[in-house]
Image (cartoon, rainbow, N blue to C red):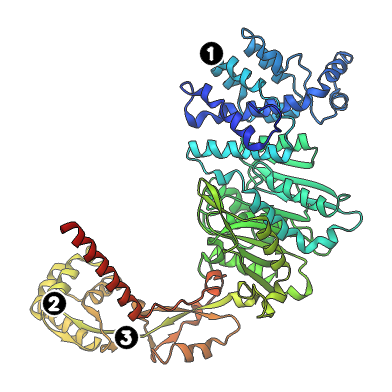
């Protein structure tokens, strides 16, 4: 329990709550602890918050016995957007060992409908039955009743408590903690980058601001965004909206919404197949969708909406089935306040895949093309690795705006913040690094001043910022073909290929033809005409009719033809045939003339090559790492040799000590 005289902290409270696991051990497996601890923590938090007005609510409820719709009156009595009319509370439930299950159920049923909906996500009644059957319900309720400071923690710190617990449960059940929440310093940096460029606008009079997180988890990003806006303009009216698929995370977020008196709504459901909030548009959006999430379960709904083109959310294209990152982004873009009104800004966390996955013409490439050609991408910020609890991979903020300032029109900022981190004293899962407050402020300043930093080589962060025109990320994917050159021969391998060729399997004269050609083993022809004449002559001599079926003829030539750079160039209908094995591809910058590039980069190396223009495609990718690559020359050989000699001397010395 909390020590006398010391205030509550989220770390101490999380530790106290986690100690309940000692009571569950044996009757519950480790990965099941969360089924009890999370809902009971939420119940006890609600119980503590309601304590000051509990008697007033009971009295008000008793005074209105015949009124059906008294919810609003009871909320007024509670001075909260929720209430409980039961005669029970945690203290009374914990004082009656024989009636603990009955009294706890009565208490749960006494909550207002909005809280009962939240608790329903935890299947609490099933856990009460199980705990009672294991004869530990009374002990669990008693342990939570002893926790006196749950009402003293701020909602911000209580968010930390829930996040700590969820991370613990996710680790124990091998689930992905990153699907639930984002480290708070990452959220703060993200919110800063999203809102800092708009600080003057946000500070203006009469600001009504709507914020959305379509993968909101426990709501940390929404809370941080509202806090940041309020810090800039305390008079701003902020409405926060979200959607979450995980029932427990949604319940925690919804409870925070109730206790914090946030204005807005958080919906429970799948953002892809059942998007919430209707046609509402938003001023700011931010999200950290799970990395590499499949969308196979909602494939039909998504593909059906994609057929609507830009009449739906996914008109730009569909990514591969095993990564829905770009679906989240397109959903958010569809929710942007139009630029002819106030416009909107959004920030989303991605891994490296959306930068470059997908060749020209693929769904991912088309989505990048649509975003860039519509000048929606403002900047990308590369973050340090090992920032998140469930993965050590590199991550990136994508920041989009449909109201970019004039100086940034048709431009994109790339900011390399991978070195802005400090080592944590203790790792949490895969999280071994964190971004400090000074580093957050530094990254924010550099991003806001990116154009000036990129233009001034004297600036300290000049090498970490680059600004590109949107078209510089585009390219033409050209197909470079070379002539198919072949010689023709009969060998043991050729005859074996003929015997096993699938296209000849149903041709009745296959075996006879093989026998007719066997005497030609070792013969080589350098033109197709010579080979054809010889093969037909051999077949006639053996009484075998030359086949007329195109697939059979093709199978014969496939067996006897061999690619050879000195061979005859093969033709069909007057055109040179390409050699598929020599086919190559080149990415030509979008604004460069294809023929000029081809003559300069390709022809000097392969003079007989040509471009198959029918296969040319437009692609877009953002090779972030390549743009910030710094060549490190290898160490001089003399230095390496000297080091090796020194190591050899040390080894000889150690061996001498052992053998001496």
In the displayed structure, does residue 427 sit left or right of residue 6?
Answer: left
Tag 1 near tag 2, CB within 8 Å: no
Tell which of 269 and 296 is nearer to you.
269
Looking at the rendered image, the quarter that the N terminus falls into is top right
Residue position marked by numbered label 1 in the rendering: 135
Q: Which residue is mark 3?
A: 570
Q: Quadrant of residue 444?
A: bottom right
The reply to whether discs 3 and 1 touch (Cβ–Cβ < 8 Å) is no
Q: Position of residue 655 (x, y in %)?
A: 20, 61
* Mark 2 lies on residue: 491
Question: Which sits in the foreground, 540 or 582?
Answer: 582
619 over 147 or under it: above or below: below
> Residue 222: x and y, percent?
72, 47
Closer to the camera, 177 or 321?
177
Q: Is residue 162 left or right of residue 616?
A: right
Q: Disc 3 to disc 1, how far (Cα)? A: 85 Å
Residue 577 pos. (x, y %): 36, 83
């Amino acid at each position: 329990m909390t020590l006398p005289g010391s205030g509550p902290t989220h770390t101490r409270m999380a530790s106290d709550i986690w100690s309940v696991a000692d009571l569950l051990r044996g009757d519950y497996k480790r990965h099941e602890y969360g089924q009890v601890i999370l809902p009971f923590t939420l119940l006890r938090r609600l119980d503590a918050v309601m304590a000051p007005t509990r008697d007033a609510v009971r009295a008000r409820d008793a005074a209105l016995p015949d009124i059906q719709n008294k919810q609003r009156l009871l909320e007024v009595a509670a001075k909260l957007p929720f209430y409980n009319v039961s005669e029970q509370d945690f203290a009374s439930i914990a004082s009656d060992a024989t009636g603990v299950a009955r009294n706890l159920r009565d208490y749960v049923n006494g909550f207002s409908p909005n809280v009962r909906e939240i608790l329903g996500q935890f299947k609490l009644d099933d856990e009460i039955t199980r705990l009672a059957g294991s004869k530990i319900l009374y002990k669990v309720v008693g342990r939570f009743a002893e926790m006196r400071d749950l009402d003293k923690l701020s909602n911000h710190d209580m968010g930390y408590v829930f996040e700590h617990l969820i991370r613990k449960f996710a680790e124990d059940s091998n689930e992905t903690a990153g699907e639930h929440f984002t480290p708070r310093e990452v959220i703060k940096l993200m919110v800063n980058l999203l809102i800092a460029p708009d600080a003057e606008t946000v500070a203006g009079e009469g600001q009504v601001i709507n914020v959305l997180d379509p993968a909101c988890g426990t709501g940390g990003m929404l809370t941080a965004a509202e806090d940041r806006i309020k810090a800039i303009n305390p008079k701003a009216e902020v409405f926060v909206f979200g959607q979450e698929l995980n029932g427990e995370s949604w319940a925690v977020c919804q409870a925070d919404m109730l206790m914090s008196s946030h204005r807005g709504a958080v919906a429970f459901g799948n953002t892809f197949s059942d998007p919430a909030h209707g046609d509402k548009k938003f001023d700011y959006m931010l999200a950290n969708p799970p990395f590499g999430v499949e969308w196979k379960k909602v494939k039909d709904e998504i593909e059906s909406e994609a057929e609507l083109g830009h009449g739906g959310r996914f008109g730009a294209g569909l990514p591969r089935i095993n990564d829905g990152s770009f679906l989240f982004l397109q959903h958010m873009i569809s929710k942007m306040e139009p630029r002819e009104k106030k416009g909107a800004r959004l920030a989303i966390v991605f891994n490296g895949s959306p930068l470059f996955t997908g060749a020209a013409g693929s769904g991912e490439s088309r989505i990048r093309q649509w975003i860039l050609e519509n000048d929606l991408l403002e900047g990308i910020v590369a973050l340090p690795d090992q920032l998140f609890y469930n993965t050590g991979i590199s991550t990136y903020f994508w920041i989009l705006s449909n109201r970019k300032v004039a100086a940034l029109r048709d431009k994109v900022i790339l900011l390399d913040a991978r070195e802005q981190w400090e080592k944590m004293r203790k790792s949490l899962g895969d999280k071994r690094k964190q971004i400090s407050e000074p580093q957050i402020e530094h990254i924010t300043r550099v991003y806001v001043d990116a154009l000036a930093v990129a233009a001034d080589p004297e600036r300290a962060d000049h090498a970490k910022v680059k600004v590109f025109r949107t078209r510089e990320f585009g390219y033409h994917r050209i197909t470079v073909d070379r002539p198919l050159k072949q010689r023709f021969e009969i060998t043991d391998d050729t005859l074996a290929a003929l015997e096993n060729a699938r296209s000849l399997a149903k041709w009745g004269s296959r075996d006879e033809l093989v026998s007719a050609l066997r005497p030609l083993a070792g013969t080589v022809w350098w033109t197709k005409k010579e080979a054809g004449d010889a093969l037909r002559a051999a077949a006639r001599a053996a009484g075998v009719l030359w086949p007329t079926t195109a697939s059979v003829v093709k199978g014969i030539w496939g067996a006897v033809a061999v690619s050879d750079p000195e061979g005859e160039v093969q033709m069909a209908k007057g055109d040179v045939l390409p050699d598929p094995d020599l086919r190559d591809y080149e990415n030509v910058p979008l604004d460069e003339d294809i023929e000029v590039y081809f003559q300069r980069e390709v022809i000097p190396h392969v003079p007989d090559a040509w471009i198959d223009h029918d296969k040319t495609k437009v692609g877009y990718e953002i090779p972030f790492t390549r743009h910030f690559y710094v060549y490190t020359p290898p160490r001089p050989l003399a230095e390496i040799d000297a080091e090796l000699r020194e190591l050899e001397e040390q080894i000889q010395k150690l061996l001498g000590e052992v053998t001496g």
